Amino acid sequence: MNRYEEFLSRLLKGEIILIDGGTGTEVERRGVPQLKNAWNAGGSLTHPQIIKGIHSDFIKEGATIIISNTFATCKHLMKDADCLDDFELVNRRSVELAIEARNDLNKDNVLVAGGISHWSFTNKLPSLIDLEEGASEQAIIMKDAGADLILLEMMIDIPRMLSVLKGVKNSNLPIWVGLSCEPDEKGVMRLLSGQKDLVDSSPNLRVGETLEEAILSLKDQNIPLINIMHTDVEYIDKCLDIVKHNWNGLVGVYAHSGDDIQMEWTFDKVISPKDYLNYCERWIKKGINIIGGCCGTGPEHIKHLKENLF
């Protein structure tokens, strides 16, 4: 039984497993310069020891799943950043740094997930075919670098999500899907429409499909686990109620806290580890299988969860 199969077995037996916190915002917090149009994508090449240190800190505090610093290293973002030549290298090194952190700490039981998104910081959105092909290349690079699974993050558009999913299946790695949500003016939980500035300028971008529609679109895709992630802590309960009525598989949560202002995260508005624990205890009662944090949350949040939940 390989590392991933052992994790899946534990989850299916009802064990709750701790994932890491917000690696991307932790990169920002530790002073790594941002890459224009690709957020913190370049850190694995320009500041590898900081990236590796972040993974190490999350592992030390109890996380047994860590996600590579690759949220913004998809092909179209690297192109937007004029760094397309680094596409293969940055994705490979990002996964390798997570694995090196695991190896240095002799934590062979830690699972390394290659994170892939379809996000854009510009209105230069790729076609669905290009998105699929780019995701396929990215996932294969991650597999060759040693990733244990592929984790789709911030899926906020169903056609684009399905294109990315189709592409990453070529890697033959296990795949988990992360959905990000917010309520509309009527309180209906929908996929995150955070790219409001792109809606009018890009006819290819669809926003606002319901969480229920997104879940239903994944039912025949051989996905064992859905995460509600990069969703504000206040909205998680309602999301989990929708998941409960529409999904029979495993469920994870890693919420965010705070917000960005012109791509700078507002850490002064991040929830305290104690208050985040209170939310997590409530979510666990709803039957989730994985718990951790997203943007804004750091090693101190994971430490508090480990000390009080496990």
Image (cartoon, rainbow, N blue to C red):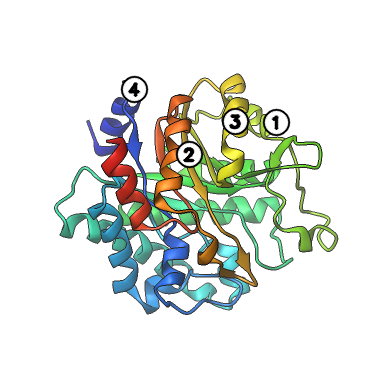
For marks 1 and 3, give the one nearer the viewer: 1
Disc 1 to disc 4, how far (Cα)?
27 Å
Seen at 59% across and 67% down, the residue is 77
Q: Is 135 on the left or on the right of 119, as rendered?
A: left
| Quarter of the rendering occupied by the C terminus | top left
**Numbered disc total:** 4
Q: Disc 4 marks which residue?
A: 14
- Three-letter amino acid code at disc 2? Tyr
For marks 4 and 2, give the one nearer the viewer: 2
Disc 3 to disc 2, how far (Cα)?
27 Å
Disc 3 to disc 4, how far (Cα)?
22 Å
Tag 4 near tag 2, CB within 8 Å: no
Q: Disc 3 marks which residue?
A: 218
Q: Is 181 on the left or on the right of 70, as rendered?
A: right
Disc 1 to disc 2, how far (Cα)?
26 Å
For marks 3 and 4, give the one nearer the viewer: 4
Q: Nearer the viewer, residue 154 or 262?
A: 262
SS for tag 3? loop
Q: Position of residue 171 (x, y in %)?
A: 43, 45
Disc 1 to disc 3, how far (Cα)?
9 Å
The part of the image, by quadrant, that contains residue 196 is: bottom right
Which comes before the other along the chain, label 3 or label 2? 3
Tag 1 near tag 3, CB within 8 Å: no
- Three-letter amino acid code at disc 3? Leu
| Quarter of the rendering occupied by the N terminus | top left
Q: Disc 1 marks which residue?
A: 213
Which comes before the other along the chain, label 1 or label 2? 1
Q: Position of residue 66 (x, y in %)?
A: 34, 51
SS for tag 1? helix
Q: Is residue 106 visible?
A: yes
Q: Disc 2 marks which residue?
A: 279
Q: Position of residue 247 (x, y in %)?
A: 56, 23
